[in-house]
Image (cartoon, rainbow, N blue to C red):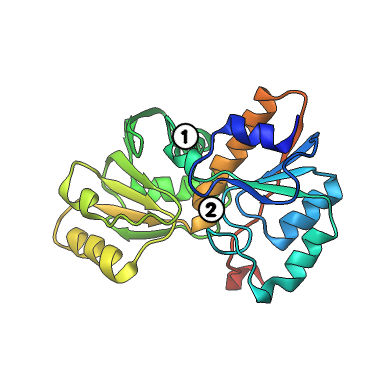
């Protein structure tokens, strides 16, 4: 199979497609990651990957134009035979949001998606319990909670990654919790905090961009391995972008 064939079968949309390398090369080993950090690239090359499937940009912009300050990263890729394709928009905007599905599956949530971003739990839980579960199962070091932490959660809004949406839906609809990768604190979290202080049973969890989406890409690696048994597929973990003081 060629890299371009796999890309066409995965579906592609606006920013998806060939990012680096030769789309016509034959592929046997496929690495999958949330973002192609220098460390992920080095590990993928050492493993012998022919292709790297990444969710986020390799060169820090959707156009994938190589800035002058990434000379060493560009040289690392140039010294390898690695091809990179991006799978982002189709992951989110296909028939279902694959990142959301992977997130819920890895956490072992029981319930169903009422909409592509609204998960309804079979049995209520709490923001604090969900935050602790996310830290334990997804390996995120710090989940931040804003608003009420102990109220029953029946319906959770998933806004993983860096959504442009604000918290209007959380505060105006029958939604108990919003789970975000990134968020505007002064606009959104202060509104959630005030709502809780004034008696509303509302909360937000903030996970960090990478932590909110890497479970979806782990699931993508599993799905690719099942769909294409002729390929050897492995997920490569990027970790969080932050180092915390209690980790040093």
Q: Quadrant of residue 182?
A: bottom left
Residue 106 pos. (x, y %) = 54, 36
Q: Answer few, some or many: residues within 10 Å of disc 2's Cα (few below 14, many 20 plus, some between 14 and 19).
A: many
Q: Quadrant of residue 117?
A: top left
**Tally of numbered discs:** 2
Mark yes or no: residue 115 visible: yes
At a point 83% along the width and 50% down the height, the residue shown is 81
**Secondary element at tag 1:** helix
Quarter the C terminus occupies: bottom right
Relative depth, front residue between 155 and 32: 32
At a point 16% along the width and 49% down the height, the residue shown is 172
Side of 134 relative to 217 (left or right): left
Q: Answer few, some or many: residues within 10 Å of disc 1's Cα (few below 14, many 20 plus, some between 14 and 19).
A: some
Looking at the rendered structure, which numbered label has been put on residue 101? 1
Side of 42 relative to 225 (left or right): right
Relative depth, front residue between 2 and 228: 2
At a point 60% along the width and 33% down the height, the residue shown is 8
Q: Rounded to the nearest whole Å, what is the CA distance between mark 1 and mark 2?
A: 15 Å
Q: Quadrant of residue 155?
A: top left
Side of 23 relative to 15 (left or right): right
Q: In this view, does 123 lie above or below 157?
A: above
Residue 52 pos. (x, y %) = 71, 46
Side of 161 relative to 200 (left or right): right
- Badge 2 is on which residue? 211
**Secondary element at tag 2:** helix
Quarter the N terminus occupies: top right
Q: Is residue 106 above or below residue 111?
A: below
Looking at the rendered structure, which numbered label has been put on residue 60? none
């Amino acid at each position: 199979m060629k890299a371009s064939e796999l890309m066409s079968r995965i579906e592609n949309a606006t920013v998806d497609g060939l990012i680096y390398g030769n789309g016509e090369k034959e592929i046997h080993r496929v690495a999958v990651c949330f973002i192609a950090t220098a460390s992920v690239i080095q590990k993928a090359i050492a493993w012998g990957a022919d292709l790297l499937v990444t969710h986020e940009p390799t060169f820090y912009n959707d156009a994938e134009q190589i800035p002058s300050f990434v000379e060493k990263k560009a040289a690392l890729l140039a010294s390898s035979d690695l091809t990179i394709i991006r799978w982002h928009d189709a992951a989110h905007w296909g028939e279902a949001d694959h990142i959301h599905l992977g997130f819920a599956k890895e956490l072992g949530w029981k319930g169903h998606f009422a909409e592509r971003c609204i998960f309804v739990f079979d049995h209520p839980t709490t923001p604090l319990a969900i935050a602790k579960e996310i830290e334990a199962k997804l390996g995120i070091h710090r989940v931040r909670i804003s608003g009420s932490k102990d109220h029953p959660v029946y319906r959770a809004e998933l806004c993983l990654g860096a959504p442009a949406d604000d918290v209007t839906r959380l505060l105006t609809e029958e939604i108990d919790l919003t789970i975000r990768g990134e968020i505007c604190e002064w606009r959104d979290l202060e509104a959630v905090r005030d709502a809780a202080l004034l008696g509303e049973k509302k909360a937000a969890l903030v996970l960090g961009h990478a932590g909110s989406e890497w479970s979806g890409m782990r699931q993508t690696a599993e799905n690719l391995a099942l769909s294409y048994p002729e390929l050897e597929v492995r997920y490569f973990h990027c970790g969080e972008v932050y180092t915390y003081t209690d980790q040093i």
